[in-house]
Image (cartoon, rainbow, N blue to C red):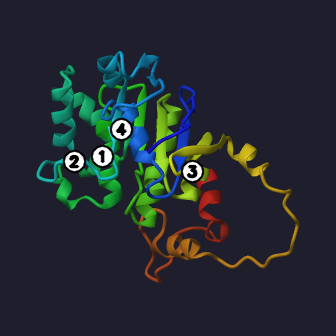
């Protein structure tokens, strides 16, 4: 049950709704996407009232659920063409090819989706959600069940969405995911938003940090990417082809480079 849920999302930004399982994140998404009627209160999506103008709301967004909604029998390109045709777009083949290039799936375009990795399926799923250029996209726990490499791929995709001007509402239970992606973060607990702000604003809720000497050891994530590489390519010794400086950098530092 939701109670006291109140937030605004700035256009072209990434807003993360962070909470544990059962906190109410998916319920919020279902209300915003007109799949569930709110008992009280008002909800607007892209300027349209969810209760009074549901058709206009549905024209304004696309939704990517917790599991990739792709047809494994079809190829990646066929999935995109199918959705473009269902949306009655002109030249669906060109639409598909553009999205395949944008999401680095051109080389796998003619392969059946059943052969795709988890990260590739999720990228294709998000690409399908962008057909028709919706101003808003809802991502409901988009990296659940993905391996570390696929997760990083999805993070890059979400960042690109915001760069293209898409408004993204992201639900997640992963703290580092919200920290990495969101312009603003709201923490949902037992159906209520208890804090809402930028990462810096949330950090100021705690006492000032103390400066202490800590010997930093490589994390398991550092080891994983050093061995398999960002793109899963390594040399004959099992170490990714990268500079010494890159090997020592954290995944977040590599992303900033």
Q: Which residue is mark 3?
A: 178
- Residue at x 28% of width, y 38% of height: 128
x then y, percent, for residue 236: 43, 81
User: What is the secondary structure assignment of the residue under circle 3?
Assistant: helix
Q: Position of residue 214 (x, y in %)?
A: 80, 76
Q: Nearer the viewer, residue 139 or 105?
A: 139
Horizontal arrangement in the rendering, residue 157 relative to residue 244 (left or right): left
Q: Position of residue 204 (x, y in %)?
A: 79, 48
Q: Residues within 10 Å of mark 1 (few under 14, many from 20)?
A: many
Q: Secondary structure at mark 2?
A: loop
Disc number for residue 135? none
Q: Cβ–Cβ below 8 Å for labels 4 and 1?
A: no
Q: Is residue 46 above or below residue 181?
A: above
Q: Is 132 or 111 nearer to us in this picture? A: 132
Label 3 crowd (10 A; few <14 / some 14-19 / many >=20)? many
Q: CA distance from mark 2 to mark 3?
A: 25 Å
- The N terminus: image quadrant: top left
Q: Sequence-wise, which precedes: disc 4 or disc 3?
A: 4
Which residue is at 68% across, 41% downward? 198
Q: CA distance from mark 2 to mark 4?
A: 20 Å
Disc with the residue nearer the chain's start (3 vs 1):
1
């Amino acid at each position: 049950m939701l109670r006291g849920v109140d937030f605004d999302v700035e256009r072209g930004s990434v807003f993360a709704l962070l909470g544990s399982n059962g906190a109410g994140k998916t319920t919020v998404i279902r209300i915003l996407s007109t799949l569930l009627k709110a008992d009280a209160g008002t909800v607007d999506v892209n300027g349209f009232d969810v209760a009074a103008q549901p058709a206009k709301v549905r024209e304004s967004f696309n939704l990517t659920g917790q599991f990739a909604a792709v047809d494994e029998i079809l190829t990646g390109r066929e999935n995109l063409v199918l959705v473009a045709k269902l949306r009655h777009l002109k030249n669906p083949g060109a639409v598909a090819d553009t999205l395949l290039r944008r999401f680095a799936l051109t080389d796998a375009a003619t392969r059946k989706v059943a052969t795709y990795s988890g990260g590739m399926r999720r990228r294709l799923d998000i690409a399908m959600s962008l057909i028709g250029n919706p101003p808003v996209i809802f991502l409901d726990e988009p990296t659940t069940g993905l391996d570390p490499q696929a997760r990083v791929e999805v993070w890059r995709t979400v960042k690109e969405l915001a760069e293209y001007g898409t408004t993204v509402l992201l639900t997640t239970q992963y703290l580092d995911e919200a920290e990495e992606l969101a312009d603003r973060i709201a923490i949902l607990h037992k159906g209520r938003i208890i804090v809402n702000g930028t990462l810096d604003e949330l950090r100021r809720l705690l006492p000032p940090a103390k400066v202490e000497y800590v010997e930093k050891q490589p994390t398991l994530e550092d080891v994983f990417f050093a061995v398999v590489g960002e793109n899963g390519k390594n040399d004959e010794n099992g170490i990714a082809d990268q500079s010494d400086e890159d090997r020592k950098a954290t995944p977040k530092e590599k992303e900033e480079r």
